[in-house]
Image (cartoon, rainbow, N blue to C red):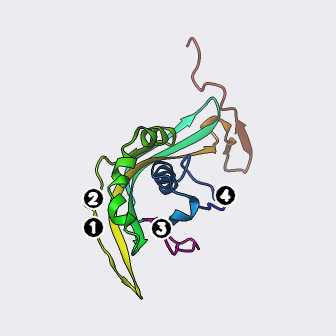
Amino acid sequence: MARTFNTPTTTTVEPIVSIANILKYRMNLNNNQIILNYQKNQIPPDGLYLTLNYSGPDEAIASQATFDSSTQTEINEAVYSHNINIQIMSLSPDNSARIRKEEIPLALRSNYAKQIADKNLLGISWLPSDILDISYFDETAFLNRFSMNIVVYALHRLVVDSDSFDSFPVSIEEQNGITYPINTQVSPYIVGG
């Protein structure tokens, strides 16, 4: 399956990895049959395999930043729509790509897919794009190849430690160079006055 090299991410699981895991499970594929683009993988000489890649652009839909004073943390959140291209392929005489291409949208609408999406704060589009036949001759073999695009909505969250206003050191400096610290915990207003 996909290797992430322990790169920190702002989602529970990277959206494309969640989609790959759903397809692997629902289509009963092994790790060698799912390929994420830009990774060094061997294309299987026979049998069915899928490739997935971000086809961009990733569009920001919403964002917000909040401060939790009880934990002194800043919470930054953004929702992005990710365009993911999925290609299903098999070398002739194996025609499983042509026969099984419709299983992809079915797998992505399954109860299993809904559970994975909920767990990883994702929304998977109800309908993929049209399934395009992009088959061609590849050297001496005919490659059965079909392509579709889906949109995945993902909540990205980054939580960082943050100082609040009352934890910054505040002081006043007079013209003669004398500095007076200010206690920000004390109200500047006279009580009862």
Kindly report which numbered mark, 1 or 2, lies closer to the viewer in this rendering: 1
Label 1 and label 2: CA atoms lie apart by 9 Å
Q: Amino acid at mark 3?
A: Gly
Give the main secondary structure of the magenta stretch: loop
Label 3 and label 4: CA atoms lie apart by 30 Å
Residues in magenta? 37-53
Residue 88 drawn at (x, y percent)? 40, 65
Mark sitting earlier along the chain (3/4): 4
For residue 71, above or below residue 116: above
Q: Amino acid at mark 2?
A: Ser
Kindly report which numbered mark, 2 or 4, lies closer to the viewer in this rendering: 2
For label 4, the SS is loop
The residue lying toward the viewer, choosing from 192 and 114, is 114
Q: Residues within 10 Å of mark 2 (few under 14, many from 20)?
A: few
Asked if the residue under mark 2 is in contact with the one under mark 1, i.e. CB atoms within 8 Å, the reply is: yes
Label 2 and label 3: CA atoms lie apart by 25 Å
Per the image, the residue denoted by label 3 is 47
Whether residue 1 is visible to the viewer of this picture, yes or no, is no
Q: Amino acid at mark 4?
A: Asn
Instruction: Report the disc number at residue 6.
Output: 4
Whether residue 131 is visible to the viewer of this picture, yes or no, is yes
Which residue is pictured at 51% across the width and 65% down the height? Answer: 36
Asked if the residue under mark 4 is in contact with the one under mark 2, i.e. CB atoms within 8 Å, the reply is: no
For label 1, the SS is strand
On the rendered image, what quadrant is the C terminus found in? Answer: top right
Q: Residues within 10 Å of mark 1 (few under 14, many from 20)?
A: few
Label 1 and label 4: CA atoms lie apart by 34 Å
For label 3, the SS is loop
Label 2 and label 4: CA atoms lie apart by 32 Å
